[in-house]
Image: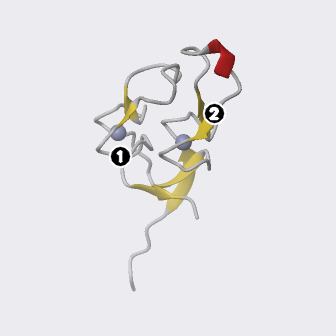
Amino acid sequence: MPQTVERRPQTCGFCDGRGVTWKKDRDPSAANESRTCPACFGRGSVLVKQPSQECAACKGWGRIGRGLDTTGGEFQLCEECGGMGWQDAVLMI
Ligand SMILES: [Zn+2]
Ligand SMILES: [Zn+2]
């Protein structure tokens, strides 16, 4: 029997499930300007191998930086998890 890997949707670490990042704090006039999350490509969730474990490198944030993305979406993606914030995560199809 082949081993099956169970994966479940978990909240994307980079965008905290929003699917987008916003520019607003850097440039108030761009308050409504957003871009698709580069980690989950707008899905807001990613499929994570169970039992899920946060990425050790970014502690689940998906990036080098803490808090909401107020830098205009220019946080650097965590290289370990590709920004998803989880170990062994893949994109939702
Ligand atoms: Zn995301
Ligand atoms: Zn990470």
Amino acid carrying mark 2 in the image: Ser
Above or below — where is 3 with respect to 91?
A: below
Residue 68 placement (x, y as % from top left)? 53, 21
SS of the residue under disc 1: loop
Cβ of disc 2 within 8 Å of ligand 1?
no
Tell which circle, 1 or 2, labels the residue nearer the N-terminal end: 2
Q: Which mark is residue 81?
A: 1
Which residue position holds label 2? 34
Rate crowding at label 1 as few (under 14), some (14 to 19) or many (20 or more) other CA atoms within 10 Å.
Answer: many
Quadrant placement of the N terminus: bottom left
Q: Amino acid at mark 1?
A: Cys
> Which tag is nearer the camera, tag 1 or tag 2?
2
Question: CB at mark 1 closer than 8 A to ligand 2?
Answer: yes
The furthest residue to the bottom: 1
Residue placed at 57% from the left, 52% from the top?
9
Q: Quadrant of residue 53?
A: top left
Q: Considering the image in quadrants, where does the C terminus appear?
A: bottom right
